[in-house]
Image (cartoon, helix red, strand yellow):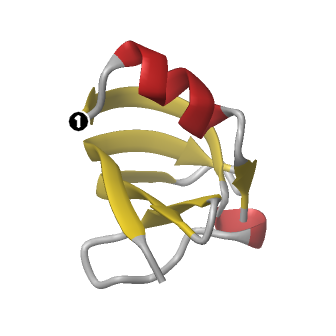
Amino acid sequence: MKSILFAINIKAVLQDNSEVDNVKGFVINNKRIYKLSDDTILTGTKKIKKFLFATFTVSPEILHVIMSLENI
């Protein structure tokens, strides 16, 4: 299983309208996954609805490809 870190310090609003920060974005098995600092995966009602801030660790060209991947 290959894992790529593509974003750090994410602050976002979730589907249930709660806010989270210090989230990291990964690509694992060709899917985008967002994790809290305790490794909880954000999914379902805890899925990201709106990004407020993020620091990306990849180039814009690669980010474009990553953002087109399925988000679990």
Q: Quadrant of residue 9?
A: top left
The residue wearing badge 1 is 57
Q: Position of residue 62 (x, y in %)?
A: 45, 27
The residue that appears at 75% across and 66% down in the rendered structure is 45
Q: Who is closer to the viewer here, 7 or 60?
A: 60
Q: Position of residue 57 (x, y in %)?
A: 23, 36
Q: Who is closer to the viewer here, 59 or 10?
A: 59
Q: Position of residue 35 (x, y in %)?
A: 41, 69
The residue that appears at 67% across and 58% down in the rendered structure is 47
> Where is 19 relative to 62, above or below?
below
Q: Position of residue 23 (x, y in %)?
A: 33, 57
The amino acid type found where label 1 is placed reads: Thr
Position of 41 with respect to 38 (left or right) is: right
Position of 67 with respect to 52 (left or right) is: right
> Where is 68 relative to 43, above or below?
above
Q: Quadrant of residue 5?
A: bottom left
